[in-house]
Amino acid sequence: MTFAVLAFLAMFLLIVSGGFLLFYREEMIHRITDVINPQPKPKSLLNTIQQTGISIGGVVGHFENVLPRSQAEVSVALQRLQRAGFRDESADKIFYGSKVLVPLLLCFFILVSGLGQYGGIFMYILALGVGFLMPDFWLGKRISKRQSAIRRGLPDVLDLLVICIEAGLSLDQGTARTATELKAAQPELCDELGIVVLEQRAGRPRGDAWKHMAERTNVDCVRNLVSMLV
């Protein structure tokens, strides 16, 4: 039992060390580039918070290659991430990296806290299983919360959209105006409307752009609205 715990701890430290080495290697390359081509940037509290979040995401993202997955699983994960509002290119890497890192952190917590004495190897197996599923549960809660916000914000968005159309604007102009005016009050739904506007400006037909919005949100009332508009 002691040998298994030590072996697990050694593997955990090796994986974490490898991730940090890869991360700091990229950081060193960026620093050398900044020295060769200095580009002064004003630093603020917001920039510091954003850089810290990106750094943590980069460290977690290095662990995603440890977990084997199929292309179908990646497609489903990307769809769920989009429904949760995560459209960054590294979102799937951070998601799969957390499914590796969270179980290891839970096992490390059990080892340090001494909880392993009460359940033995069963506690570590339970920690691995719970840690592997925790990112999925968190993502599901995030999707439900965002869908509820979209559902609550739809009446306000429709009211302003009708007012814009009655004022003489076209449907496309009214959508763009609504996405801008209500961005602070209804950020989730206005974010989706903004994507509809961008897709139409890129040349996508209006019906297809609205249908993609219904697929991204997966909200019944939005699907009904899109069906009526199409």
Image (tube, rainbow, N blue to C red):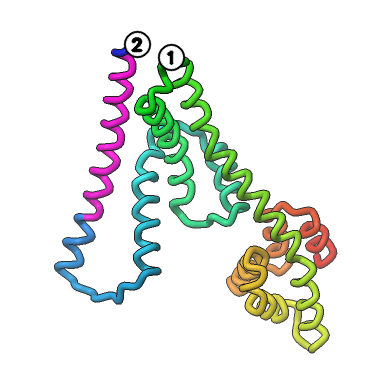
Q: Is residue 204 visible?
A: no
Q: Position of residue 211 (x, y in %)?
A: 72, 59
Q: Are marks 1 and 2 in contact (CB under 8 Å)?
A: yes
Q: Which residue is mark 1?
A: 120
Nearer the observer, 14 or 75: 14
Q: Is residue 189 visible?
A: yes
Rendered view: 127 above or below 52: above
* Mark 2 crowdedness (10 Å alpha carbons): few <14, some 14-19, many ≥20: few
Which residues, given as a range, are shown in magenta? 3-27
Q: Which residue is mark 2?
A: 1
The quadrant in which residue 186 appears is: bottom right
Say which quadrant the C terminus sits in. bottom right
Query: Given the image, on which type of amino acid does mark 1 rest?
Result: Gly
In percent of the image, x 35 and y 43: which residue is there?
A: 62
Say which quadrant the N terminus sits in. top left
In percent of the image, x 44 and y 51: which residue is there?
A: 90
What is the magenta segment's predominant secondary structure?
Answer: helix
Residue occupying the far bottom of the picture: 168
Compare marks 1 and 2 and give the one earlier in the sequence. Answer: 2
Rendered view: 93 above or below 111: below
Q: Is residue 133 left or right of residue 55?
A: right
Nearer the observer, 205 or 138: 138
Residue 38 circle label: none
Rendered view: 188 above or below 10: below
